[in-house]
Image (cartoon, rainbow, N blue to C red):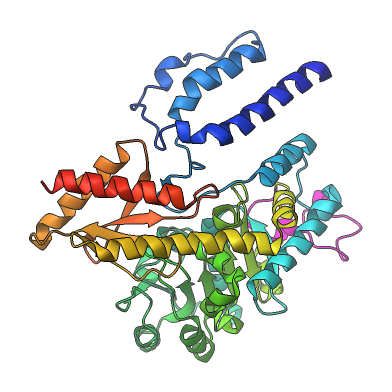
Protein backbone atom coordinates (compact mmCIF):
# COMPACT_ATOMS: atom_id res chain seq x y z
CA UNK A 1 0.00 0.00 0.00
CA UNK A 2 1.52 3.31 -1.02
CA UNK A 3 1.25 6.59 0.83
CA UNK A 4 -1.65 7.93 -1.24
CA UNK A 5 -3.79 4.82 -0.81
CA UNK A 6 -3.00 4.76 2.91
CA UNK A 7 -4.10 8.39 3.26
CA UNK A 8 -7.23 7.79 1.18
CA UNK A 9 -8.45 4.95 3.40
CA UNK A 10 -7.14 6.61 6.53
CA UNK A 11 -9.36 9.63 5.90
CA UNK A 12 -12.30 7.35 5.09
CA UNK A 13 -11.85 5.30 8.25
CA UNK A 14 -11.63 8.40 10.45
CA UNK A 15 -14.77 9.74 8.77
CA UNK A 16 -16.47 6.39 9.34
CA UNK A 17 -15.57 6.35 13.06
CA UNK A 18 -16.78 9.94 13.49
CA UNK A 19 -20.07 9.09 11.74
CA UNK A 20 -20.40 5.87 13.73
CA UNK A 21 -20.13 7.71 17.05
CA UNK A 22 -22.64 10.31 15.82
CA UNK A 23 -25.14 7.70 14.55
CA UNK A 24 -24.56 4.96 17.11
CA UNK A 25 -28.11 5.24 18.48
CA UNK A 26 -29.40 3.90 15.14
CA UNK A 27 -27.93 0.48 15.97
CA UNK A 28 -29.47 -2.06 18.35
CA UNK A 29 -27.38 -2.01 21.51
CA UNK A 30 -27.04 -5.80 21.57
CA UNK A 31 -26.05 -7.60 18.35
CA UNK A 32 -29.05 -9.39 16.85
CA UNK A 33 -27.17 -12.13 14.97
CA UNK A 34 -27.59 -15.84 15.71
CA UNK A 35 -24.70 -18.16 16.65
CA UNK A 36 -22.68 -19.10 13.57
CA UNK A 37 -24.20 -16.38 11.39
CA UNK A 38 -20.96 -14.41 11.01
CA UNK A 39 -18.82 -17.51 10.36
CA UNK A 40 -21.20 -18.69 7.65
CA UNK A 41 -20.49 -15.55 5.62
CA UNK A 42 -16.70 -15.90 5.77
CA UNK A 43 -14.58 -18.21 3.59
CA UNK A 44 -13.13 -21.28 5.29
CA UNK A 45 -9.72 -20.82 3.61
CA UNK A 46 -7.46 -17.75 3.54
CA UNK A 47 -7.15 -15.82 0.25
CA UNK A 48 -4.25 -16.92 -1.93
CA UNK A 49 -3.98 -13.54 -3.63
CA UNK A 50 -4.19 -10.20 -1.88
CA UNK A 51 -7.52 -8.38 -2.10
CA UNK A 52 -8.30 -4.67 -2.58
CA UNK A 53 -8.92 -2.88 0.70
CA UNK A 54 -12.19 -1.54 -0.70
CA UNK A 55 -13.69 -5.02 -0.63
CA UNK A 56 -12.36 -5.73 2.84
CA UNK A 57 -13.93 -2.54 4.13
CA UNK A 58 -17.25 -3.41 2.51
CA UNK A 59 -17.24 -6.81 4.21
CA UNK A 60 -16.43 -5.13 7.51
CA UNK A 61 -19.54 -2.99 7.18
CA UNK A 62 -21.84 -5.70 5.80
CA UNK A 63 -20.67 -8.81 7.68
CA UNK A 64 -18.72 -7.79 10.77
CA UNK A 65 -20.65 -4.73 11.96
CA UNK A 66 -23.99 -6.57 12.39
CA UNK A 67 -22.17 -8.91 14.80
CA UNK A 68 -20.93 -6.06 17.00
CA UNK A 69 -22.52 -5.28 20.36
CA UNK A 70 -22.20 -1.53 20.74
CA UNK A 71 -20.49 -0.82 24.04
CA UNK A 72 -20.31 2.92 23.27
CA UNK A 73 -24.09 3.16 22.79
CA UNK A 74 -25.62 5.68 25.22
CA UNK A 75 -28.21 3.05 26.19
CA UNK A 76 -25.52 0.61 27.27
CA UNK A 77 -26.34 -0.18 30.90
CA UNK A 78 -24.86 -3.69 31.16
CA UNK A 79 -21.88 -4.99 33.11
CA UNK A 80 -19.74 -1.87 33.54
CA UNK A 81 -18.79 0.51 30.72
CA UNK A 82 -15.73 -0.02 28.53
CA UNK A 83 -15.46 3.56 27.41
CA UNK A 84 -13.57 5.37 24.73
CA UNK A 85 -13.41 9.03 23.74
CA UNK A 86 -12.26 11.02 20.70
CA UNK A 87 -8.85 11.96 22.17
CA UNK A 88 -8.25 8.36 23.21
CA UNK A 89 -9.20 7.03 19.77
CA UNK A 90 -6.85 9.47 18.06
CA UNK A 91 -4.04 8.57 20.44
CA UNK A 92 -4.59 4.89 19.63
CA UNK A 93 -4.15 5.77 15.95
CA UNK A 94 -0.78 7.35 16.73
CA UNK A 95 0.20 4.40 18.90
CA UNK A 96 -0.65 1.97 16.10
CA UNK A 97 1.23 4.07 13.57
CA UNK A 98 4.36 4.25 15.70
CA UNK A 99 4.16 0.53 16.41
CA UNK A 100 6.60 0.59 19.32
CA UNK A 101 7.20 -2.35 21.63
CA UNK A 102 7.94 -0.66 24.94
CA UNK A 103 9.46 -3.42 27.07
CA UNK A 104 12.43 -1.42 28.38
CA UNK A 105 13.38 2.25 28.60
CA UNK A 106 15.76 2.01 25.64
CA UNK A 107 13.09 0.61 23.29
CA UNK A 108 11.21 3.92 23.63
CA UNK A 109 12.32 6.33 26.38
CA UNK A 110 9.24 8.52 25.90
CA UNK A 111 6.89 5.58 26.53
CA UNK A 112 8.58 4.68 29.83
CA UNK A 113 8.88 8.22 31.13
CA UNK A 114 5.39 9.28 30.03
CA UNK A 115 4.00 6.25 31.89
CA UNK A 116 5.81 7.38 35.04
CA UNK A 117 4.40 10.90 34.75
CA UNK A 118 0.81 9.92 33.89
CA UNK A 119 0.62 7.35 36.70
CA UNK A 120 1.86 9.97 39.16
CA UNK A 121 -0.88 12.30 37.87
CA UNK A 122 -3.41 9.56 38.55
CA UNK A 123 -2.06 8.97 42.04
CA UNK A 124 -2.54 12.66 42.82
CA UNK A 125 -6.00 12.73 41.23
CA UNK A 126 -7.19 9.80 43.35
CA UNK A 127 -5.46 10.94 46.52
CA UNK A 128 -3.46 7.75 47.03
CA UNK A 129 -0.62 8.01 49.57
CA UNK A 130 2.60 9.69 48.49
CA UNK A 131 5.25 7.16 47.66
CA UNK A 132 2.95 4.74 45.89
CA UNK A 133 4.26 4.12 42.39
CA UNK A 134 2.20 3.19 39.36
CA UNK A 135 2.49 1.04 36.26
CA UNK A 136 -0.03 0.27 33.51
CA UNK A 137 -1.26 -3.33 33.25
CA UNK A 138 -3.70 -4.54 30.61
CA UNK A 139 -6.67 -5.39 32.88
CA UNK A 140 -7.58 -5.49 36.57
CA UNK A 141 -7.58 -9.29 36.38
CA UNK A 142 -3.92 -9.23 35.38
CA UNK A 143 -3.11 -6.56 37.96
CA UNK A 144 -4.71 -8.64 40.71
CA UNK A 145 -2.74 -11.69 39.58
CA UNK A 146 0.40 -9.54 39.77
CA UNK A 147 -0.59 -8.56 43.32
CA UNK A 148 -1.19 -12.20 44.29
CA UNK A 149 2.16 -13.30 42.86
CA UNK A 150 3.95 -10.49 44.66
CA UNK A 151 2.12 -11.32 47.91
CA UNK A 152 3.08 -14.98 47.51
CA UNK A 153 6.77 -14.14 47.20
CA UNK A 154 6.59 -11.55 49.95
CA UNK A 155 4.95 -13.99 52.36
CA UNK A 156 7.27 -16.90 51.59
CA UNK A 157 10.04 -17.45 54.11
CA UNK A 158 13.01 -18.52 52.02
CA UNK A 159 14.93 -20.06 54.90
CA UNK A 160 11.91 -22.09 55.98
CA UNK A 161 11.45 -23.28 52.41
CA UNK A 162 15.04 -24.46 52.29
CA UNK A 163 14.38 -26.60 55.34
CA UNK A 164 11.17 -27.96 53.83
CA UNK A 165 8.90 -26.34 56.41
CA UNK A 166 6.65 -24.38 54.09
CA UNK A 167 3.19 -23.61 55.46
CA UNK A 168 0.22 -23.35 53.06
CA UNK A 169 -0.45 -19.70 52.16
CA UNK A 170 -4.00 -18.38 52.45
CA UNK A 171 -5.82 -15.57 50.60
CA UNK A 172 -8.94 -13.79 51.89
CA UNK A 173 -11.63 -11.93 49.94
CA UNK A 174 -15.29 -11.11 50.47
CA UNK A 175 -18.02 -13.40 49.21
CA UNK A 176 -18.84 -10.64 46.72
CA UNK A 177 -15.34 -10.48 45.24
CA UNK A 178 -14.76 -10.63 41.48
CA UNK A 179 -14.40 -14.03 39.81
CA UNK A 180 -10.88 -13.11 38.68
CA UNK A 181 -9.71 -13.50 42.28
CA UNK A 182 -10.39 -17.22 42.29
CA UNK A 183 -8.73 -17.57 38.89
CA UNK A 184 -5.71 -15.58 40.08
CA UNK A 185 -5.44 -17.66 43.26
CA UNK A 186 -5.33 -20.82 41.17
CA UNK A 187 -2.82 -19.46 38.64
CA UNK A 188 -0.56 -18.08 41.39
CA UNK A 189 -0.38 -21.51 43.01
CA UNK A 190 -2.18 -20.80 46.28
CA UNK A 191 -4.82 -23.36 45.37
CA UNK A 192 -8.57 -22.77 45.30
CA UNK A 193 -8.90 -24.57 48.63
CA UNK A 194 -6.77 -21.84 50.25
CA UNK A 195 -9.07 -18.98 49.24
CA UNK A 196 -11.35 -17.92 52.10
CA UNK A 197 -14.57 -16.09 51.26
CA UNK A 198 -15.45 -13.69 54.07
CA UNK A 199 -19.14 -12.96 54.83
CA UNK A 200 -20.59 -9.53 54.08
CA UNK A 201 -22.99 -7.17 55.84
CA UNK A 202 -26.40 -5.94 54.70
CA UNK A 203 -24.68 -3.59 52.24
CA UNK A 204 -22.66 -6.52 50.76
CA UNK A 205 -19.37 -5.19 52.17
CA UNK A 206 -16.82 -7.42 53.90
CA UNK A 207 -17.21 -7.86 57.67
CA UNK A 208 -13.80 -7.12 59.27
CA UNK A 209 -14.69 -9.13 62.36
CA UNK A 210 -15.25 -12.22 60.22
CA UNK A 211 -11.96 -11.58 58.43
CA UNK A 212 -10.06 -11.52 61.70
CA UNK A 213 -11.80 -14.68 62.88
CA UNK A 214 -10.73 -16.47 59.69
CA UNK A 215 -7.13 -15.26 59.98
CA UNK A 216 -6.84 -16.41 63.61
CA UNK A 217 -8.39 -19.78 62.81
CA UNK A 218 -5.96 -20.38 59.95
CA UNK A 219 -3.01 -19.53 62.17
CA UNK A 220 -4.24 -22.05 64.73
CA UNK A 221 -4.52 -24.71 61.99
CA UNK A 222 -0.94 -24.19 60.82
CA UNK A 223 -1.66 -22.08 57.73
CA UNK A 224 0.10 -18.83 56.86
CA UNK A 225 -2.29 -15.95 56.09
CA UNK A 226 -0.70 -14.11 53.17
CA UNK A 227 -3.02 -11.70 51.36
CA UNK A 228 -6.35 -9.92 51.65
CA UNK A 229 -8.24 -8.61 48.61
CA UNK A 230 -10.47 -5.68 49.53
CA UNK A 231 -13.01 -4.65 46.90
CA UNK A 232 -13.89 -1.00 46.45
CA UNK A 233 -16.98 -1.29 44.27
CA UNK A 234 -17.96 -4.93 43.82
CA UNK A 235 -19.12 -6.04 40.38
CA UNK A 236 -22.56 -7.12 41.57
CA UNK A 237 -23.55 -4.04 43.57
CA UNK A 238 -20.55 -1.63 43.91
CA UNK A 239 -20.31 -2.48 47.61
CA UNK A 240 -17.29 -0.84 49.23
CA UNK A 241 -15.31 -2.89 51.72
CA UNK A 242 -14.22 -0.93 54.85
CA UNK A 243 -10.59 -0.36 53.91
CA UNK A 244 -9.51 1.22 57.18
CA UNK A 245 -10.68 -1.64 59.42
CA UNK A 246 -9.38 -4.27 57.01
CA UNK A 247 -6.06 -2.44 56.76
CA UNK A 248 -5.55 -2.45 60.52
CA UNK A 249 -6.12 -6.22 60.61
CA UNK A 250 -3.62 -6.68 57.78
CA UNK A 251 -1.04 -4.56 59.56
CA UNK A 252 -1.51 -6.47 62.82
CA UNK A 253 -1.11 -9.88 61.16
CA UNK A 254 1.47 -8.89 58.54
CA UNK A 255 -0.74 -9.51 55.50
CA UNK A 256 -0.41 -8.06 52.01
CA UNK A 257 -3.46 -5.85 51.32
CA UNK A 258 -4.58 -5.43 47.71
CA UNK A 259 -7.46 -3.09 46.85
CA UNK A 260 -9.49 -3.90 43.74
CA UNK A 261 -11.28 -0.73 42.60
CA UNK A 262 -11.54 -1.65 38.92
CA UNK A 263 -14.67 0.35 38.09
CA UNK A 264 -15.35 2.45 41.18
CA UNK A 265 -11.81 3.77 41.65
CA UNK A 266 -12.39 6.57 39.14
CA UNK A 267 -14.99 8.05 41.51
CA UNK A 268 -12.18 8.90 43.94
CA UNK A 269 -11.23 11.83 41.69
CA UNK A 270 -14.32 13.51 43.20
CA UNK A 271 -13.70 15.26 46.54
CA UNK A 272 -17.08 14.02 47.81
CA UNK A 273 -16.07 10.38 47.19
CA UNK A 274 -12.62 10.43 48.80
CA UNK A 275 -14.00 8.59 51.85
CA UNK A 276 -13.96 5.33 49.86
CA UNK A 277 -10.15 5.44 50.14
CA UNK A 278 -10.06 6.00 53.89
CA UNK A 279 -7.39 3.60 55.11
CA UNK A 280 -5.39 3.69 51.85
CA UNK A 281 -2.23 4.13 53.92
CA UNK A 282 -2.51 0.42 54.78
CA UNK A 283 -2.77 -0.70 51.14
CA UNK A 284 0.17 -2.52 49.56
CA UNK A 285 -1.26 -2.54 46.04
CA UNK A 286 -4.21 -0.88 44.33
CA UNK A 287 -5.81 -1.16 40.90
CA UNK A 288 -8.44 0.73 38.93
CA UNK A 289 -9.32 0.81 35.23
CA UNK A 290 -9.22 4.07 33.29
CA UNK A 291 -10.69 1.99 30.43
CA UNK A 292 -13.93 1.69 32.41
CA UNK A 293 -14.94 5.09 33.76
CA UNK A 294 -12.14 7.40 32.68
CA UNK A 295 -13.01 7.35 28.98
CA UNK A 296 -9.81 5.66 27.82
CA UNK A 297 -9.87 2.87 25.23
CA UNK A 298 -9.53 -0.69 26.43
CA UNK A 299 -7.07 -1.84 27.64
CA UNK A 300 -5.58 0.37 30.34
CA UNK A 301 -5.41 -0.68 33.98
CA UNK A 302 -3.57 1.50 36.52
CA UNK A 303 -1.74 -0.53 39.18
CA UNK A 304 -0.05 1.09 42.17
CA UNK A 305 2.32 -0.42 44.73
CA UNK A 306 3.72 0.83 47.99
CA UNK A 307 6.92 -1.19 47.70
CA UNK A 308 8.01 -1.41 44.06
CA UNK A 309 11.08 -3.41 45.09
CA UNK A 310 8.82 -6.29 46.16
CA UNK A 311 7.10 -6.14 42.77
CA UNK A 312 10.36 -6.06 40.84
CA UNK A 313 11.87 -8.93 42.84
CA UNK A 314 8.88 -11.04 41.80
CA UNK A 315 9.17 -10.39 38.07
CA UNK A 316 12.67 -9.17 37.22
CA UNK A 317 14.70 -10.98 34.60
CA UNK A 318 18.27 -10.37 33.44
CA UNK A 319 18.93 -12.16 30.13
CA UNK A 320 21.93 -10.79 28.31
CA UNK A 321 19.96 -9.58 25.29
CA UNK A 322 17.86 -7.24 27.46
CA UNK A 323 20.74 -5.56 29.30
CA UNK A 324 21.42 -1.93 28.44
CA UNK A 325 23.78 0.74 29.67
CA UNK A 326 20.93 2.75 31.17
CA UNK A 327 19.38 0.01 33.35
CA UNK A 328 20.69 1.45 36.62
CA UNK A 329 19.23 4.89 35.91
CA UNK A 330 15.73 4.12 34.55
CA UNK A 331 12.56 2.11 35.11
CA UNK A 332 12.31 -0.93 32.85
CA UNK A 333 8.63 -1.79 33.07
CA UNK A 334 9.23 -5.29 31.72
CA UNK A 335 10.00 -6.12 35.37
CA UNK A 336 6.73 -4.67 36.69
CA UNK A 337 4.34 -7.30 35.41
CA UNK A 338 3.87 -10.62 33.63
CA UNK A 339 4.53 -9.98 29.89
CA UNK A 340 7.85 -8.92 28.47
CA UNK A 341 6.28 -7.01 25.57
CA UNK A 342 4.33 -3.86 26.38
CA UNK A 343 2.08 -1.56 24.37
CA UNK A 344 2.42 2.23 24.56
CA UNK A 345 -0.75 2.56 26.66
CA UNK A 346 0.31 5.74 28.45
CA UNK A 347 -0.17 7.86 25.32
CA UNK A 348 -3.97 7.53 25.17
CA UNK A 349 -4.29 8.14 28.90
CA UNK A 350 -2.14 11.28 28.57
CA UNK A 351 -4.34 12.52 25.72
CA UNK A 352 -7.52 11.94 27.74
CA UNK A 353 -6.33 13.69 30.91
CA UNK A 354 -4.91 16.65 29.01
CA UNK A 355 -7.96 17.03 26.74
CA UNK A 356 -10.63 16.89 29.45
CA UNK A 357 -8.61 18.04 32.44
CA UNK A 358 -9.40 16.88 35.96
CA UNK A 359 -12.46 19.13 36.12
CA UNK A 360 -13.87 17.77 32.85
CA UNK A 361 -13.45 14.17 34.01
CA UNK A 362 -15.03 15.01 37.35
CA UNK A 363 -18.01 16.61 35.63
CA UNK A 364 -18.77 13.47 33.59
CA UNK A 365 -18.37 11.06 36.51
CA UNK A 366 -20.45 13.29 38.78
CA UNK A 367 -23.25 13.38 36.19
CA UNK A 368 -23.33 9.59 35.96
CA UNK A 369 -23.63 9.37 39.74
CA UNK A 370 -26.49 11.90 39.64
CA UNK A 371 -28.28 9.81 37.01
CA UNK A 372 -27.83 6.69 39.12
CA UNK A 373 -29.43 8.41 42.09
CA UNK A 374 -32.25 9.67 39.88
CA UNK A 375 -32.95 6.15 38.65
CA UNK A 376 -32.88 4.92 42.25
CA UNK A 377 -35.59 7.43 43.16
CA UNK A 378 -37.80 6.20 40.31
CA UNK A 379 -37.40 2.58 41.43
CA UNK A 380 -38.20 3.42 45.04
CA UNK A 381 -41.41 5.22 44.05
CA UNK A 382 -42.88 2.23 42.19
CA UNK A 383 -44.84 -0.41 44.13
CA UNK A 384 -43.88 -3.26 41.80
CA UNK A 385 -40.15 -2.55 41.92
CA UNK A 386 -37.67 -3.26 44.68
CA UNK A 387 -34.22 -1.77 45.30
CA UNK A 388 -31.84 -4.63 46.08
CA UNK A 389 -28.64 -2.89 47.26
CA UNK A 390 -27.42 0.54 48.35
CA UNK A 391 -26.64 2.85 45.43
CA UNK A 392 -23.11 3.95 46.24
CA UNK A 393 -22.25 5.30 42.80
CA UNK A 394 -24.03 4.95 39.44
CA UNK A 395 -25.06 1.27 39.58
CA UNK A 396 -28.65 0.49 40.60
CA UNK A 397 -29.60 -3.09 41.53
CA UNK A 398 -33.34 -3.69 41.37
CA UNK A 399 -35.98 -6.27 40.50
CA UNK A 400 -39.66 -6.71 39.84
CA UNK A 401 -41.57 -7.78 42.94
CA UNK A 402 -45.34 -7.93 42.70
CA UNK A 403 -45.72 -9.88 45.92
CA UNK A 404 -45.56 -13.40 44.50
CA UNK A 405 -43.62 -16.16 46.26
CA UNK A 406 -39.88 -15.64 46.54
CA UNK A 407 -39.11 -18.82 44.59
CA UNK A 408 -41.07 -17.45 41.60
CA UNK A 409 -39.40 -14.03 41.51
CA UNK A 410 -36.14 -15.26 39.99
CA UNK A 411 -37.81 -16.66 36.87
CA UNK A 412 -40.03 -13.57 36.63
CA UNK A 413 -37.02 -11.24 36.64
CA UNK A 414 -35.06 -13.38 34.22
CA UNK A 415 -37.96 -13.18 31.78
CA UNK A 416 -38.20 -9.45 32.45
CA UNK A 417 -34.53 -8.85 31.63
CA UNK A 418 -34.74 -10.89 28.43
CA UNK A 419 -37.79 -8.91 27.30
CA UNK A 420 -35.88 -5.65 27.79
CA UNK A 421 -32.71 -6.73 25.98
CA UNK A 422 -34.59 -8.31 23.07
CA UNK A 423 -35.92 -4.89 22.09
CA UNK A 424 -32.42 -3.78 21.07
CA UNK A 425 -33.18 -0.41 22.66
CA UNK A 426 -31.23 -1.00 25.88
CA UNK A 427 -28.86 -3.54 27.35
CA UNK A 428 -28.86 -4.41 31.05
CA UNK A 429 -27.15 -7.33 32.76
CA UNK A 430 -27.99 -9.28 35.91
CA UNK A 431 -26.39 -10.65 39.05
CA UNK A 432 -27.26 -12.83 42.00
CA UNK A 433 -27.44 -11.28 45.47
CA UNK A 434 -27.92 -13.90 48.15
CA UNK A 435 -29.84 -16.19 45.84
CA UNK A 436 -31.98 -13.43 44.33
CA UNK A 437 -31.93 -12.71 40.59
CA UNK A 438 -31.26 -8.98 40.29
CA UNK A 439 -31.14 -6.56 37.34
CA UNK A 440 -28.19 -4.17 37.15
CA UNK A 441 -28.62 -0.68 35.70
CA UNK A 442 -24.98 0.37 35.22
CA UNK A 443 -24.78 4.02 34.15
CA UNK A 444 -21.36 5.13 32.93
CA UNK A 445 -21.14 5.24 29.13
CA UNK A 446 -19.56 8.46 27.94
CA UNK A 447 -22.49 9.50 25.71
CA UNK A 448 -25.27 8.62 28.17
CA UNK A 449 -27.31 11.58 29.34
CA UNK A 450 -30.57 11.97 31.23
CA UNK A 451 -32.68 11.42 28.11
CA UNK A 452 -31.31 7.92 27.65
CA UNK A 453 -31.89 7.01 31.29
CA UNK A 454 -35.49 8.30 31.11
CA UNK A 455 -36.13 6.36 27.90
CA UNK A 456 -34.75 3.22 29.55
CA UNK A 457 -37.04 3.74 32.55
CA UNK A 458 -40.07 4.20 30.29
CA UNK A 459 -39.21 0.93 28.52
CA UNK A 460 -38.74 -0.81 31.86
CA UNK A 461 -42.18 0.36 32.99
CA UNK A 462 -43.74 -0.68 29.69
CA UNK A 463 -42.25 -4.19 29.73
CA UNK A 464 -43.03 -4.70 33.39
CA UNK A 465 -46.69 -3.78 32.80
CA UNK A 466 -46.88 -6.29 29.95
CA UNK A 467 -45.33 -9.00 32.09
CA UNK A 468 -47.55 -8.40 35.12
CA UNK A 469 -50.86 -8.32 33.25
Toward the viewer: 326 or 138? Answer: 138
* 269 is higher (above) or lower (below) than 421: below
Q: Which residues are magenta?
A: 318-342
Residue displayed at 68% across by 46% down: 88
Magenta stretch prevailing secondary structure: loop
* 12 is higher (above) or lower (below) than 421: above
Residue displayed at 58% across by 78% down: 283
Q: Is residue 341 magenta?
A: yes
* 354 is higher (above) or lower (below) than 273: above
Residue displayed at 52% across by 60% down: 367
Toward the viewer: 155 or 268? Answer: 268
Q: How many marks?
A: 0
Question: Residue 249: where, in percent of width, then height?
Answer: 47, 88
Residue displayed at 66% across by 73% down: 310
Toward the viewer: 457 or 68? Answer: 457
The reply, left or right, for residue 281 in relation to residue 67 is right
Question: Residue 306: where, in percent of width, then height?
Answer: 66, 76
Question: Residue 150: where, in percent of width, then height?
Answer: 59, 69
The quadrant where residue 301 appears:
bottom right
Whether residue 163 can be seen here:
no
Q: Residue furthest top?
A: 49
Amino acid sequence: MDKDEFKQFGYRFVDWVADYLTRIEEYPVLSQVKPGEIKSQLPAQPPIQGEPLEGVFEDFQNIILPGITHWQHPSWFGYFPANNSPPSILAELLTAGIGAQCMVWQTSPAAAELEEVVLEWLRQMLGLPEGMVGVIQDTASTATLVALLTAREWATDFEANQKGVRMPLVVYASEETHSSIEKGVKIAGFGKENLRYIPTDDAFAMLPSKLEEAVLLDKERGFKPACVIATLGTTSSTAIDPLLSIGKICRQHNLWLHADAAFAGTAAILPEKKEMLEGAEYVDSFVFNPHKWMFTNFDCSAYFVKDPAALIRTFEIHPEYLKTGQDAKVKNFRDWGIPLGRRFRALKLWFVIRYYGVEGLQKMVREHIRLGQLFREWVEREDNFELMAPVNLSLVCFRLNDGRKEEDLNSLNQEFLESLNQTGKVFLSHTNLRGKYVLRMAIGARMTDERHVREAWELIQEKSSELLK
